[in-house]
Every structure is written in structure tokens, then in C-alpha cells.
Image (spheres, helix red, strand yellow):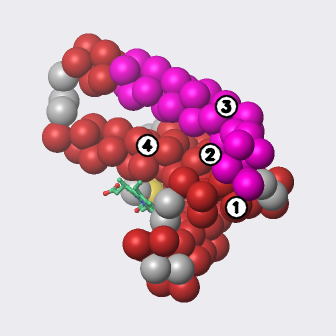
Amino acid sequence: MAAITEKTGITRRKVQIQSNFERRAFLFMRLSGIALLILAVGHMLIQHVLNSSTNLTIMFVAEQWNSWGWKLFDFLLLVFTVPHGINGLRNILEDYIHNESLMKGINILLLIFVVATLLWAGYAIINFDSTPFMN
Ligand code: HEM
């Protein structure tokens, strides 16, 4: 909302500026959206269109994760998708839940979920050893 002061005729903004965290989260949604256009769309095309879903065995995964390039691709997919999806869920929940303490509790649970998922799934991708499957 903007108001023009009578004396000077200067327009002054009267919008409530949101916290830095919310601004960064908003920017993250846009930037991760761009990254997901390549990562998520690429993933769908490569894994589910170019390759038949019936071929998606552990051998297929082991062959891909024998390469650091594919590990990096899947790691980035993880790092962008999980916070993007959960922050999006948080935005939707905040539209409907107006109880501040309940929302605070939900935010803490969502944060724990994101951190735990990034840690265990990231660990699994980085440390996956293809050699037992490569005979
Ligand atoms: C091509 C891939 C994707 C693109 C380009 C994309 C882009 C975006 C953008 C720009 C927003 C912000 C909308 C706004 O603030 O008005 C958004 C919101 C959201 N995204 Fe994505 N996204 C993608 C994939 C995903 C995936 C894979 C998930 C789930 C894991 C997801 C879940 C959400 C959710 C829940 C919201 C919040 C919707 C809302 O506020 O109503 N998105 N997305």
C-alpha cells in the first residue's frame, strides 16, 4: 500500500516488510524452482521416459552411482527438492493455521524432518558403494 504525503507529494510505502527469513525463503522457492526445472524435469525424462521404469533395478542405480556426476545430480535434486517441497507445504499450512504456537511446533517438526532427510539421504548417496553390484 502507498500513501502520498500532503506537504511534499512524495509517495511513501506503507507495506509491512516481512522478516529476512521469509524473504529468503521466498527467494529460495523461486531459485530452487529454476534448479528443479533442470533437475526434476531431467530426472523424470531420464529415469522414467528415456529409460523404462521396469529397468529401474538396483543394478541400474548402482551403474549410475558408480559415477560422481550422477551422484552429484541426485544429491542436488535432494538438496533442492526437499526444502522446496517442505517450505511450500509450510506456506500452505500458514494460510490455514492461524494459531501461532501450533504453527511454531509444526515449523520445528518440519525443520527436523528436512535436516534429518538431507543428512541420511545425502549420506546414502555420497557413501553408496557400487562395487558389489558390478560383476
Ligand atoms: C519443475 C519443477 C518445479 C518448479 C519449476 C517449481 C516452482 C515453484 C515456484 C516458483 C513456487 C513458488 C510459488 C509462489 O510462491 O507463488 C513453488 C511452490 C511450491 N512448490 Fe514447486 N516447483 C517445482 C517442483 C516441485 C516439487 C517436486 C515439489 C514437491 C516436492 C514442489 C512443491 C511445491 C509446493 C508445496 C509449493 C507451495 C505452493 C503454494 O504456496 O501454494 N514443487 N514451486
Q: Which mark is residue 64?
A: 1
Upstream in sequence: badge 1 or badge 3: 1
Q: Nearer the viewer, residue 9 or 68?
A: 68
Q: Residue at x 50, y 60 (%)?
A: 57
Label 1: how many Cα within 10 Å (few below 14, some 14–19, many 20+): some
How far is mark 4 from mark 1, CA to CA? 29 Å
Check disc 4 and report the residue beneath it: 87
Compared with 70, 113 (above or below) is above
Residue identifier under label 2: 79
Residue 8 is drawn in which quadrant?
Answer: bottom right
Residue 18 or residue 27, whichever sits in front: 27
**Mark 3 highlights which residue?**
123
Among numbered discs 1 and 2, the one appearing first in the sequence: 1
Amino acid type shown at disc 1: Gln
Q: Earlier in the sequence, mark 4 or mark 1?
A: 1
- Three-letter code for the amino acid on which mark 3 is drawn: Tyr
Give neighbour class at mark 3: few <14, some 14-19, many 20+ (Cα, 10 Å).
few
Horizontal side of 107 relative to 120 (left or right) equals left
Q: Earlier in the sequence, mark 4 or mark 3?
A: 4
Q: CA distance from mark 3 to mark 2?
A: 12 Å
Asked if ligand 1 lies within 8 A of label 4, the reply is yes
Q: Given the image, on which type of amino acid does mark 4 rest?
A: Asn
Q: Are marks 4 and 3 in contact (CB under 8 Å)?
A: no
Q: Residue at x 51, y 31 (%)?
A: 117
Between the residue at mark 1 and the residue at mark 2, the CA separation in whole angstroms equals 18 Å
